[in-house]
Image: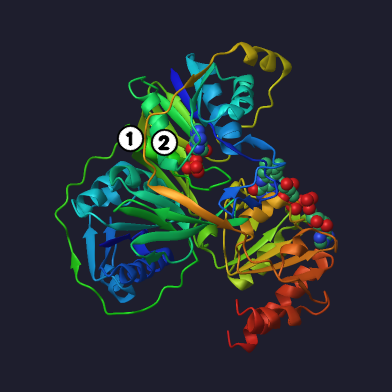
Amino acid sequence: MVLVLAETTKGKFKKAAFEAVSYGYQTAQLLGTECAALVLGTASGAEELGKYGAAKVYHVQDASLDNLDSQVYTAIISELVGKLEGTVVILSHSSTGKSLLGRLAVRLNAGSVAGVNSLPSVEAGVFKVRKPVFSGKAISEFELRSPNKVLSLMGNSYQPKIVGAPATVENPNVSVPARRIKVKEVKRVEGITPLPEAELVVSAGRGMKGPENWGIVEELAQVMGATTACSRPVADADWRPHHEHVGQTGIAIRPNLYIAIGISGAIQHLAGVNNSKTIVVINKDPEAPFFKAADYGVVGDLFEVVPKLTAAYKKFKAEQGG
Amino acid sequence: MKLLVCVSKTPETTAKIAFTNNNSEFDTAGVQFIMNPYDEWYALVRAIELQEANGGTVTLINVGTADNDTIIRKGLAIGADDAVRVDAKPGSALFVAKQIAEYAKGKDFDIIFAGKETIDYNGAEVGAMIAEFLDLPFISFASHLELSGNVATVSRDIEGGTEVLEVATPFVLSASKDLAEQRIPNMRGIMMAKKKPLNVIPPVAFEDLAVINSYELPPAKTAVKLVNPEDMDELIRLLHEEAKVI
Ligand SMILES: Cc1cc2nc3c(=O)[nH]c(=O)nc-3n(C[C@H](O)[C@H](O)[C@H](O)COP(=O)(O)OP(=O)(O)OC[C@H]3O[C@@H](n4cnc5c(N)ncnc54)[C@H](O)[C@@H]3O)c2cc1C
Ligand SMILES: Nc1ncnc2c1ncn2[C@@H]1O[C@H](COP(=O)(O)O)[C@@H](O)[C@H]1O
């Protein structure tokens, strides 16, 4: 069996959930088995996961599961897997999935790979899967030698596909242990797609000169529906909030489009963004290292270029009819 | 209080990434190694701060060979009291976690600290594995930790926000940025570190379930296409028609 944990935020399925179910479905096809999805906590529309290939959806509708407690989640997942040897558990490579992967590997006596970005291969019973290492500077191929396996899927690396119809949702009879970690508060920035899930990212660095100049960056992001990010010195100087810091010591992202404004492109910054599908660099220094990692470059003064780009995007949107 | 900090060794952040032995091994020639930044800057420093405030000991643990001793000594110079090195080549995350859990078993550590992830294998797995081996709660990506008696209040980074959590010791935590401020070892620390105990212990037998067969470098990026700064309509056109991302 392939068992996919489909994550939700505030009762709604994340894009990553559909990616994981699609990936799980394809993996199940490779292994000649079925894919089931698991939903933990309050959620609506669980039957929709069937469209992405879940033959069955288990939903444990218990509000104590709305926030992660890795011990509780592990107990439920391992009870569902039960004595089935040869189960592949698929998680999203998110704050939830990353916290569970290792626990499940121990509990299920399973080999694990964190952050896979392509389908596994199964040849002559040998299960291999690839993942980026060295912050995206290389790719390694893992071989998993245990009957059970646990993988976490990197966000935005696998396109969800509709392959079927809504599935029946079953409420399995599993015990939900008491949490040992108490949730006191959950603070979320409302209305903006969180960076790890954003498809479009507008990011700026020290070239901005000071926090008072960020208006042009925010305006570009707003008209594009993009999420804002920044380089490390900018967050360190408190010009921007820490959760915007991307790179080796910040967060690693892989959006479809990353626009870097006044960022030099130090190797530690690139480590967090070099897996983006398309990179645009705006920098007045033609020698800035970022141009080597870019798909499109604009050599110019950001204070002139960015407003022009915003205007051009607005025009484009108007021509597209909204 | 008794605190344990897991520290790993990683290539320095600007190191050239290359492979040898038919692309099956990382090429360490000319590579400088450092303590994993999440372990050194955040996990270790927060542990030392707690020890300074509440008394007790901070023990470092590393799974690795003798060439890791320089990094371990640096951790002692920053302020840990003693260190343990499990004398084995670190295989998979599961192997490393098993070794650390075996050492920690029955020693009543109040908090076991790990880093958010190692910057070479980017797994973020070891902390969760130790927690499961020892049947302890695990809080990942901690950016803030306060302790009052045996109850900890911890902020945890999640997508687009933070969770504020409460947990009683003992537990395992992984450190992300902001948990503490980096400390640079001073001369006195470096001198004292030479006299602090570094115990080398043998590994327990454990069969790896995940092995790396080979590595490859990502395909080389094609040269950048420069766009006239006066013509942002052209950039939009390229993003729409060529890159197809907007
Ligand atoms: C262990 C370690 C970990 C690190 N982790 C990270 C990390 O996670 N993320 C990260 O970002 N950094 C990280 N760094 C820091 C990194 O090395 C760089 O120092 C940092 O990324 C530089 O930020 P920046 O590009 O914003 O600033 P700078 O390097 O100062 O670059 C500013 C750029 O703006 C351009 N510019 C200036 N004015 C204009 C203008 N008017 N118009 C257009 N362009 C302009 C300049 O040409 C320059 O290229 C790390 C460093 C170390 C040692
Ligand atoms: N060989 C090791 N020895 C001690 N601790 C380690 C080792 N490898 C990883 N760790 C710890 O586990 C954390 C997460 O590592 P990883 O799961 O490899 O990303 C690191 O930040 C360290 O705290």
Instruction: Tell me if mark 2 has few (under 14), some (14-19) or many (20+) residues whose alpha carbon lies within 10 angstroms of its own.
Output: many
Q: Residue at x 37, y 27 (%)?
A: B102
**Sequence-wise, which precedes: disc 1 or disc 2?**
2
Q: Quadrant of residue B197?
A: top right
Q: Is residue B245 above or below residue B65?
A: below
**Quadrant of the frame with the C terminus of chain B:** bottom right
Residue A163, compared with residue A104, is above or below; it is: below
- Amino acid carrying mark 1 in the image: Phe
Q: Which residue is mark 1?
A: B133
Identify the secondary structure beneath mark 1: helix
Residue A41 appears in which quarter of the rendering?
A: bottom left
Chain for numbered disc 1: B
SS for dot 2: helix
Q: Is residue B119 visible?
A: yes
Question: Residue at (58%, 45%) from the top-left corner?
Answer: B119
Q: Chain of mark 2?
A: B
A276 left or right, relative to A57: right
Is residue B18 shown left or right of residue A5?
Answer: right
Q: Is residue A169 above or below residue B126?
A: below
Q: Nearer the viewer, residue A122 or A311?
A: A122
Please say if the residues under marks 1 and 2 sit with CB atoms less than 8 Å apart: yes
User: Left or right of A34: which side holds B177?
Assistant: right
Q: Nearer the viewer, residue A257 or A115?
A: A115
- Other-residue count near label 1 (Cα within 10 Å), few / some / many at <14 / 14–19 / ≥20: some
The label number, if any, that marks residue B172 in the structure image: none
Amino acid beneath label 2: Ala
Of residues A212 and A231, the one nearer the viewer is: A231
Label 2 beta carbon within 8 A of ligand 2: yes
Residue carrying label 2? B97
Q: Distance between the Cα atoms at labels 1 and 2?
A: 8 Å
Residue B180 in sight: no
Q: Give residue A234's position: percent from left, percent from top.
A: 70, 48
